Image (cartoon, helix red, strand yellow):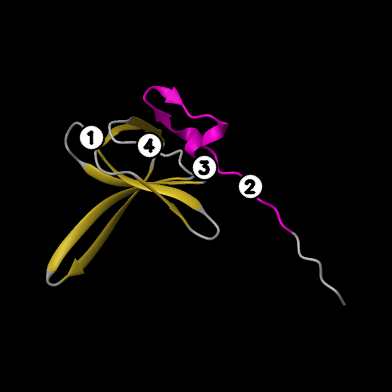
Amino acid sequence: MELLFVCFNECRMFTLKDSCYSTFCMLDKAETCVAVTVYNLAQGKGVIIGDTVAIPEPYLSQVRFKYKDKEYQLDCIRVESPLVLVVNGKKQGMDKLANICLSSIKRSH
């Protein structure tokens, strides 16, 4: 199963201490909105407004919660690597993958 969505809202890149990811909203032809989080994405390499994004074998989850007597339901897709995405008909290359940084600590006894 392949889902095809178009990014229609502002796309932002977020960086945490130990991870790099991009979260954006996408809309399909039936106007179904879904939140997408792509992990291990290189800084500044996310999708932009108007991009067409195909996600093979998406991991879809539904978040349901109640707030002030109103019930909400959100559809979310988690993508572990940008290398599985097809953006504007093109598979993503290694330049989209976040770099690995190794460090070591020297302990004195």
Q: Sequence order check: which comes first, mark 2 or mark 4? A: 4
| Residues at marks 3 and 2, CA–CA distance in whole angstroms | 10 Å
| Residues at marks 3 and 4, CA–CA distance in whole angstroms | 11 Å
Q: Which residues are magenta?
A: 81-103
Q: Sequence order check: which comes first, mark 1 or mark 3? A: 1
In this picture, is 21 found above or below 105?
above
Q: Residue furthest top?
A: 89
Q: Secondary structure at mark 4?
A: loop
Q: Sequence order check: which comes first, mark 1 or mark 4? A: 1
Q: Sequence order check: which comes first, mark 2 or mark 1? A: 1
Task: Name the residue beneath numbered marker 4.
Answer: 47
| Residues at marks 2 and 1, CA–CA distance in whole angstroms | 33 Å
Task: Name the residue beneath numbered marker 1.
Answer: 28
Q: Residue 73 location in percent, x, y?
A: 21, 56
Q: Quadrant of residue 106?
A: bottom right
Task: Give the amino acid at mark 4.
Answer: Val
